[in-house]
Image (cartoon, rainbow, N blue to C red):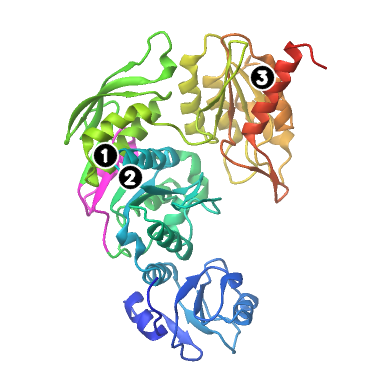
Amino acid sequence: MAAPMALEALLARCDPRGQARVQGPVVRRVDRIVMTPEQAGPGAIVAGLLHPDAAWVHACARRGAAAVIVDRDLPVEAEPTRIVLPRPGPVVGRISALLNGDASEVLQLVAVTGTNGKTTTTFFCRQLAAAAGLRFGVLGTNGFDVGQEILAPWRTTPYAPDLHALFARMVRAGLHGAAIEASSAGLIADRLIGAEVDVAVFTNLTPDHVDDHPDPEAYFAAKRRLFIDPEQARPPRLAVIDRDDPAGRRLLADGAMPCPTVSVSRRADADVRAVGITPLDPADPGRGVRFDLASPWGRWPVALPLPGAFNVSNALAAFAACAGLGMPPDRLAAAFEGLTLPRGRLEEHPVDEGGFRVFVDYAHNVGAITEALAAVRPLARGRVIAVLGASGTGRRVPSDIGRAVGRGADLCVLTTNDPDRTPVAALSRAVAAGLPDGLPHTFIEDRRAAIAHAVALAEPGDVVVALGKGHERTQLVRGEKVPYDEQESVAAALRARRARAAGSP
């Protein structure tokens, strides 16, 4: 942590354009920045990034906050001191970095953006770093690993006060670096301002999250900000970009790119590429692949024991990021054979008997569903049975999900997936409207029962894949987060099948 500072000195360093208007008494001691009134206390600045109002300011005052940051004038005359900034994010980011000892400068920091592949790529970075003798934390969808404990994530990319506090915890835990997910929502909200990113990684861009932005171009612009953002004190030292993706090629050709780039590809000529991809076991092509890893640092034969062509891309990006940080590339290449997937990413559940296989995957948008089903198709000697539902949040078109499933599955069980306040039956009808004519499908609203039904239907050679929930521990129903665990549902379904086979009641 940094030494306490007077507010005037803090703003002199963190508001270089002098945009802040300070209202209220002089603040002589500030030692931290937080997000909520509940975290406030003497010496704390509270960042009003989530629609603050007068009641929120009064709540901060009751907790003894030294100051609050707001984006507009509010009808408040008493303490605490108000710092009014029309766009508070950049100043909040710089204050957060400074009051947390500029912890991201101590860490080797990799930030990964893209529609799909962020979580897996960050996990691969951590595993490759471990092979090089370095301890990396991870921040993202699956959790916040800060070295001494793993915290449940409250956002994919936390707001700056939380983000920099997490970096500081990593430094105190003795970590050497971190791999973090940079969501488009986080980037446009300035959550990474003040973070000294060493390597920025771009995986891909598909239309699936464009509903969170005004249009596709705005979605691309949000991702681009990880690489090109005038609010950052310095750009990344290196950009790793997948050139198999059209948006990746656009980034590589961007004349404003402020740092060196490393392109990766599993199909084309690139700086880091997979040459001669073949199955590890021709009799079981889903077991993984082998190929030559060609790069500016050398060339090595590698084995990657994971299904899915997209995992080749994720592994190449992680290799390029870690090699770009100066880790021994030969040790990184050798570590490919030990890479494992995060929870809920093509996670296979062991089946004692029956000759079929069961996977859980977080895929919940068209691109990810398409990739997941393509990954399990080579494993099936029989049918691919998909269990999924459309979310009731956002503006995604459920029929598009149906078309994606129809291209990759032989049978579909439609069910619940975060319906919120939209009737599940209506969502399922919309998904079914996109299924091809003749594709067998059924609707079972209770997700546990739907998974049990799919497992009961499985025959030797079939693959059952439950899509959409992955690692998550809740369902969003009528505005409430209801406890739910996909892994437990799959385990229960397998137990029930075994009990029936054994003749148990």
Which region of the structure is painted magenta? 234-260
What residue is drawn where x is 70% and y is 22%? 495
In terms of depth relative to the viewer, which is nearer, 435 or 66? 66
Instruction: Provide the residue designation for mark 1.
Output: 320
Name the residue type under label 2: Val
SS of the residue under disc 1: helix
Name the residue type under label 1: Ala
Name the residue type under label 3: Val
- Residue 462, picture quadrant: top right
Q: CA distance from mark 2 to mark 1?
A: 9 Å
Foreground: disc 2 or disc 1: 1
Report if the CB atoms under discs 2 and 1 are less than 8 Å apart. Answer: yes
Q: Magenta segment: does it hold 248?
A: yes
Instruction: Provide the residue designation for mark 2.
Output: 201
Q: Give the quadrant of the C terminus.
A: top right
Q: Give the quadrant of the N terminus.
A: bottom left
Q: CA distance from mark 3 to mark 2?
A: 38 Å
